[in-house]
Image (cartoon, coloured by chain):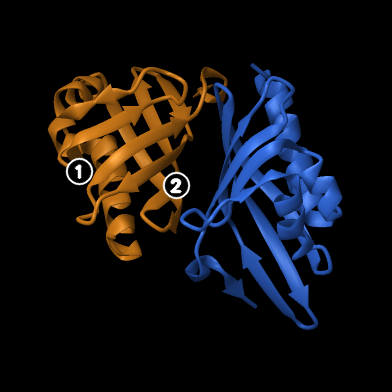
Chain colours: A blue, B orange
Amino acid sequence: MASADDIRATVRKYVEAVGSGTAADVVALYREDATVEDPVGTEPHVGHAAITKFYENIEPLQRSTELFSVRVAGDSAAFSFRVVTTFGEQTFTLDPIDVMTFDEDARIVSMRAFWSQDDMVVG
Amino acid sequence: MASADDIRATVRKYVEAVGSGTAADVVALYREDATVEDPVGTEPHVGHAAITKFYENIEPLQRSTELFSVRVAGDSAAFSFRVVTTFGEQTFTLDPIDVMTFDEDARIVSMRAFWSQDDMVVG
């Protein structure tokens, strides 16, 4: 099992990559057969190809992220963070809570993102 | 499926009951066959009898709680909150992130609590 410190490091890298990295930067943190359910209740994206396609949606957007808190338990973590996306004068702020599981190398095996459209703050 | 508002109401009642209710108050929010994994990675408590026993551990303690944020997605929610337990002059502060699923009446079907001993702040 990965150590809590290694899991926290992957979470930090993930939030940074979502904020300023390419889709490839994000996907590199996932195991090849990983699953992404974002938001929870939607059909999961399975495997690197599908996950890459998913993160390519945010690649062209001007965005920034901030990690709030991380809670590690066993091979899992839950964390809250902020994603701000900017379109011209408008900003879209979302604070999801994500849950991830990790393999022994602290690669992400599964990700589930808890949020809904109601949580999006437009400013 | 329960509405997001009903799910949020159960989460609020849960955090209040953990802060100042009896074990019975907390357990009443769970469905009879519910599961509680607290913290994640430990053996789940299954059913009202086992869950009651679990919450009876905190019943005699002087405690207070505060709900920080709730994210609802489908029939699930993730939320961060604070539990402060006081023993004489000492306080133990823990900010877990919990994930719950709910039935159509917004009763809790499963609870998983993400935290570890490292997250406990003794003051």
Residue for badge 2: B79
**Picture layout, residue A64 above or below residue B102:** below
Residue A32 in the image, given as x and y percentages of width and height: 74, 37
Q: Residues within 10 Å of mark 2 (few under 14, many from 20)?
A: many
- Which residue is found at the position 75% from the left and 39% from the top? A12
- Which residue is found at the position 21% from the left and 40% from the top? B30
Residue for badge 1: B29
Label 2 marks which chain's residue? B
Q: Marks 1 and 2, Cα distance to the nearest angstrom?
A: 16 Å
Mark 1 touching mark 2, by CB under 8 A? Answer: no
Residue B97 in the image, given as x and y percentages of width and height: 48, 38
* Residue A5 placement, left or right of B85: right
- Which residue is found at the position 15% from the left and 40% from the top? B28
Residue B105 in the image, given as x and y percentages of width and height: 19, 55
* Residue A17 placement, left or right of B56: right
Q: Residues within 10 Å of mark 1 (few under 14, many from 20)?
A: some
Which label's residue is closer to the chain start, 1 or 2?
A: 1
Residue B100, picture quadrant: top left
SS at mark 1? loop
Amino acid type, callout 1:
Leu
